[in-house]
Image: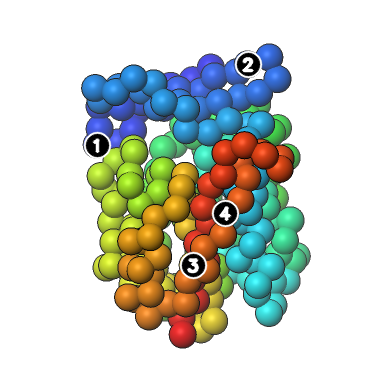
């Protein structure tokens, strides 16, 4: 249904529609096609948006940054958890992904881009990670996890300097949340090296069985 080049690579995202689902795959760059996400398997994307916001003392007026729009499920979960006074910014590097979510793909997650609390930034989420940006939650799902799959530039998000940069963009008591396809002991150690209390949570991709993904929640000590 759609194709979008991944900036700075020889790869493309491909949007497919099945009988009862949508999927986004990445292809090119010397690799065979790999499915990145599927509209029937979004339990961990929901958790990335819901879990950090549930831990806030004042979710009704939270300022949240979501890095990576995907199929919109993380954004939708944030919006369902915070209150009417919240402002939720979603950063998406690939313009076509935003357009897919404004169209038919948006039905899967309930069209969260139409919510009046949503702000859309088309560009690199790293550009919004500036000191004193005053976010209460920063939820990042920009790649397959610390072991990047799409672009090497995403590796910066998971580096020591990237973690410190994200932490500096939080309000006191704010929470960093990271999505990963699997656990990574070294990344948890990296979070703790940055002076953060890290919690690693394993969640099902779909329902209550099958593949599990990893969510890290990190607060300043």
**How busy is the neighbourhood of tag 2: few (under 14 within 10 Å), some, or many (20 plus)?**
few
* Callout 1 secondary element: loop
Q: Position of residue 50 (x, y in %)?
A: 66, 58
| Distance Cα–Cα, label 3 vs label 1 | 27 Å
Marks 1 and 2, how far apart in space?
29 Å
x, y percent for residue 59: 69, 71
- Residue under circle 3? 176
User: Of marks 2 and 4, which one's residue comes earlier in the chain?
Assistant: 2
The residue most toward the top is 19
| Precedes in sequence: disc 1 or disc 2 | 1
By what rule are the colours in the image chosen? Answer: rainbow
Per the image, the residue denoted by label 4 is 202
Mark 4 closeness class: few <14, some 14–19, many ≥20 residues within 10 Å? some
Residue at numbered disc 2: 18
Q: Is residue 8 left or right of residue 38?
A: left
Element on which disc 4 rests: strand
Note whether residue 134 is visible.
Answer: no
Mark sitting earlier along the chain (3/1): 1
Secondary element type, mark 2:
loop
Q: Would you place residue 160 above or below residue 111 in this image?
A: below
Q: Is residue 172 visible?
A: yes
From the viewer's perspective, is 31 left or right of 59?
Answer: left
Question: Which residue corresponds to the image point at 52% horizontal and 68% vertical from the top-left?
Answer: 199
Q: CA distance from mark 3 to mark 2?
A: 34 Å
| Badge 3 element | strand
**Which residue: 29% across, 41% down?**
151
The image quarter in which residue 72 lies: top right
Q: What is the CA distance from the residue labelled 3 to the residue labelled 4? A: 16 Å
Instruction: Tell me the tag on residue 8.
Output: 1
Identify the residue at horizontal 63%, vertical 45% (top origin).
204
| Among the two numbered marks 1 and 4 on one chain, the one whose residue lies closer to the N terminus | 1
- Sequence-wise first label, 3 or 4: 3
């Amino acid at each position: 249904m759609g194709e979008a080049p991944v900036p700075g690579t020889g790869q493309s995202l491909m949007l497919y529609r099945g009988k009862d689902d949508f999927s986004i795959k990445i292809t090119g760059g010397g690799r065979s096609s790999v499915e990145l996400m599927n509209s029937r398997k979004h339990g961990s994307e929901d958790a990335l948006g819901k879990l950090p916001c549930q831990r806030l003392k004042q979710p009704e007026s939270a300022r949240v940054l979501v890095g990576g729009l995907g199929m919109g499920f993380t954004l939708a979960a944030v919006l369902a958890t915070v209150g009417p006074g919240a402002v939720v910014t979603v950063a998406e590097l690939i313009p076509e992904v935003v357009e897919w979510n404004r169209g038919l793909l948006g039905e899967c997650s309930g069209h969260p881009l139409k919510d009046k609390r949503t702000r859309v930034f088309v560009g690199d989420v790293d550009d919004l990670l500036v000191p004193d940006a005053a976010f209460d939650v920063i939820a990042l799902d920009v790649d397959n996890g610390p072991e990047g799959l799409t672009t090497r530039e995403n590796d910066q998000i998971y580096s020591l300097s990237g973690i410190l940069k994200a932490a500096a963009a939080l309000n006191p008591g704010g929470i960093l949340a990271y999505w990963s396809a699997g656990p990574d002991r070294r990344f948890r150690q990296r979070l703790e090296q940055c002076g953060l209390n890290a919690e690693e949570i394993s969640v099902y991709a779909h329902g209550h069985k099958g593949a599990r993904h990893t969510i890290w929640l990190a607060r300043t000590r």
